[in-house]
Image (cartoon, helix red, strand yellow):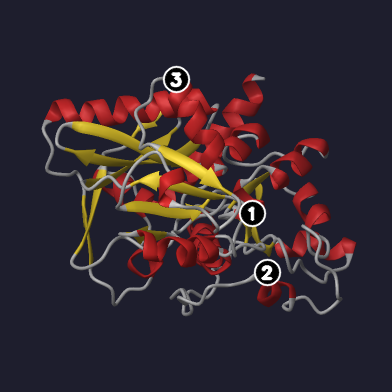
């Protein structure tokens, strides 16, 4: 089987994606699959009759998997291209993907998770891992996904949205503290916890740097968890606890920030099972398939679904591989099961 692992892209999570992509590539190659590792935004300068040579079982260098905490803006990412183009796909990406039996979507954020790439692949009959274009787009947009949660009686934090930083606390239907975040974004880039009105305008303006709409959300002070689903099976939950601050970009991906991951977590069986069932309900409500992850907050005995991730991280510090390990599933087996599950979904259509 020939597999393309697609990573990089043009989002604030580009460096996270590149790290995930290398790990996924080496895991699948260790299983004997012929894999081409491709940056979706930069592409590959290769003659068409040499594309098959990109598919190999030789491992990639993992020496540079540490993720920078630099926030990548559109300008910085566009500057990486040398041909003055800024389109979705880099050179030969579509042709390379057409040579594969399936594309493993190692992309995160923006064009990887918002359904655009999935829609392109659907048009060209290219098979890919993860959810389809519609579910991806809805899950990526925090406003739309929140509306789906409410319609399906899935408990979530109160929220409102704004397209301007010129907003007063009187316009928000709940009090401080509150959270502001880009409606379309990930890895907590542009996310802030706000304690009073003096911080409101500045932090909303910062979130608007990353999206044209900002979600303002009730702050739920509680324990933080995540539950991954693979092939309709919920993995053990993982609890995330930080020594100081909150689980922001630096705590997620920079190793010198102290973050504790407990899986399986110290939870009673009823609460743990309820969290896993709510994960399945969230998948069904959003139309997600193959695999993904749902994030929770637990306040007292109340569970709140915060958001769903259709292409969760697969870096050395990511959550889903930790949950799989707790279930006795190795990283390589996890990647292979994602591939096999999605092929089965395609074959059943």
**Residue beneath label 2, please?**
74
**Residue beneath label 1, please?**
212
How many neighbours does mark 1 have within 10 angstroms: few (below 14), some (14-19), or many (20 or more)? few
User: Where in the figure is residue 129, as x and y percent of width and height?
Assistant: 59, 41
Q: Is residue 77 above or below residue 167?
A: below
Q: Are marks 3 and 1 in contact (CB under 8 Å)?
A: no
Q: Residue drawn at (77%, 57%), measured in percent from left and top?
A: 88
**Residue beneath label 3, please?**
152
Callout 1: helix, strand or loop?
loop
Q: Earlier in the sequence, mark 2 or mark 3?
A: 2
Task: Report how far apart the C-alphas of labels 2 and 3 lie in the structure.
Answer: 35 Å
How many marks on residues? Answer: 3
Task: Report how far apart the C-alphas of labels 3 and 1 lie in the structure.
Answer: 27 Å
Q: Does residue 41 appear anywhere in the picture?
A: yes
User: Where in the figure is residue 81, as x and y percent of width and height?
Assistant: 77, 75
Q: Which mark is residue 176?
A: none
Q: Residue drawn at (65%, 24%), measured in percent from left and top?
A: 347
Image quadrant in which you'd find residue 87? bottom right
Callout 3: helix, strand or loop?
loop
Q: Does residue 101 appear anywhere in the picture?
A: no
Q: Is residue 34 above or below residue 144?
A: below
Mark 3, mark 1: which one is toward the viewer?
Answer: 1
Image quadrant in which you'd find residue 36? bottom right
* Lateral position of residue 332 relative to residue 257, left or right: right
How many neighbours does mark 2 have within 10 angstroms: few (below 14), some (14-19), or many (20 or more)? few
Mark 1, mark 2: which one is toward the viewer?
Answer: 1
């Amino acid at each position: 089987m020939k597999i393309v692992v697609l990573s990089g892209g043009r989002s604030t999570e580009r460096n996270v994606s590149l790290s995930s992509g290398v790990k996924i590539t080496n895991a699948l190659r260790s299983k004997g699959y012929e894999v081409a590792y491709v940056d979706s935004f930069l592409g590959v300068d290769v003659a068409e009759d040499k594309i098959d040579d990109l598919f190999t079982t030789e491992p990639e260098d993992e020496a540079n998997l540490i993720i920078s905490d630099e926030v990548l803006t559109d300008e910085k990412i566009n500057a990486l291209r040398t041909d003055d183009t800024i389109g979705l796909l880099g050179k030969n990406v579509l042709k390379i993907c057409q040579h594969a039996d399936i594309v493993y979507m190692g992309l995160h954020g923006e064009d990887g998770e918002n359904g655009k790439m999935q829609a392109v692949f659907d048009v060209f009959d290219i098979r890919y891992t993860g959810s389809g274009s519609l579910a991806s787009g809805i899950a990526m947009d925090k406003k739309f996904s929140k509306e789906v949660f409410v319609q399906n009686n899935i408990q979530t934090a109160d929220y409102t949205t704004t397209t301007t930083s010129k907003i007063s606390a009187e316009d928000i239907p709940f009090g401080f503290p509150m959270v502001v975040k880009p409606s379309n974004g990930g890895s907590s880039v542009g996310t802030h916890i706000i304690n009073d009105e003096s911080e409101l305008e500045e932090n909303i303006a910062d979130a608007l740097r990353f999206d044209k709409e900002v979600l303002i959300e009730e702050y739920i002070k509680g324990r933080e968890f995540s539950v991954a689903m693979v092939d309709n099976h919920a993995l053990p939950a993982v609890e995330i606890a930080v020594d100081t601050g909150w689980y922001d970009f630096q705590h997620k991906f920079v190793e010198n920030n102290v973050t504790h991951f407990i899986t399986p977590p110290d939870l009673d069986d009823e609460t743990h099972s309820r969290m896993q069932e709510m994960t399945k309900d969230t998948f069904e409500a959003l139309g997600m398939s193959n695999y993904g992850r749902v994030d929770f907050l637990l306040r007292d005995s109340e569970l709140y679904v915060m958001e769903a991730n259709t292409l969760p991280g697969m870096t050395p510090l990511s959550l889903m591989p930790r949950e799989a390990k707790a279930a006795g599933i190795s990283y390589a087996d996890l990647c292979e099961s994602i591939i096999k599950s999605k092929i089965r979904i395609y074959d059943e259509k």
